[in-house]
Amino acid sequence: MDGQRGKHTQPFSPGERLHENKLSAGIRISYGAFDYFNGGDLNGRIPFNSGQWRDVETPVGEALGPVEVCEANHHAWIDAMNEPFLHHVKPQVIVIQVWHVTHLNLSVI
């Protein structure tokens, strides 16, 4: 982007910065009838009174559809694995990789 904001090109306020987690790249691996998804640090639980555009998980889940195994987005932290995402993805198994005590939030479980 050239640094100029078009009148309707950005869903967030001037000066508001897009956090790198919203830019995570996910990968779906399919082998026959088996599907695996890793969404990196995608998140979808948005802070109160925030723009709906912050929910990245819901449109990803809609596009992705059901998988057998899903890696927990953003290490199962408080801002990830929202209900609409899980409704669309319907994983049979969720793998959670954590490296910090604040990951694996009980509200996500």
Image (cartoon, rainbow, N blue to C red):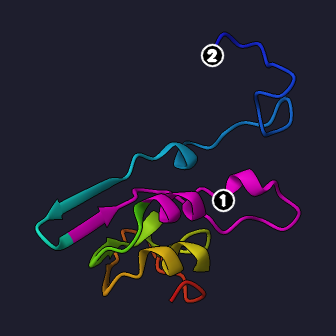
Residue occupying the point 52% across, 81% down: 87
Amino acid type, residue under disc 2 in the picture: Met
Residue occupying the point 55% across, 42% down: 20
Secondary structure beneath dot 1 equals loop
Q: Where is residue 32 in the image (x, y as percent from the top left)?
A: 10, 68
For residue 1, the mark is 2
Counting every numbered tag in the picture gives 2
For residue 91, the mark is none
Query: Does the magenta segment cover residue 45?
Result: yes
The quadrant of the rendering that contains the N terminus is top right
Which class describes the residues within 10 Å of circle 2: few (<14), some (14-19), or many (20+)? few
Amino acid type, residue under disc 1 in the picture: Asp
- Answer left or right for 79 relative to 31: right
The magenta span reads 35-63
In the image, residue 15 sits, relative to residue 55, either above or below, namely above
Place residue 16 in its image quadrant.
top right
- Answer left or right for 106 relative to 40: right
Residue furthest top in the image:
2
Q: Where is residue 86 in the image (x, y as percent from the top left)?
A: 50, 78
In the image, residue 27 sits, relative to residue 93, either above or below, namely above
Residue sitting nearer the eye, 22 or 36: 36
**Residue under numbered circle 1:** 55
Residue sitting nearer the eye, 28 or 3: 28
Q: Position of residue 99 (x, y in %)?
A: 36, 68
Q: Where is residue 62 in the image (x, y as percent from the top left)?
A: 52, 64
- Answer left or right for 46 relative to 40: right
Which class describes the residues within 10 Å of circle 1: few (<14), some (14-19), or many (20+)? many
Q: Are marks 1 and 2 in contact (CB under 8 Å)?
A: no
Residue 71 in view of the camera: yes
- What's the distance in space between the residues labelled 1 and 2, CA to CA? 22 Å
Secondary structure beneath dot 2 equals loop
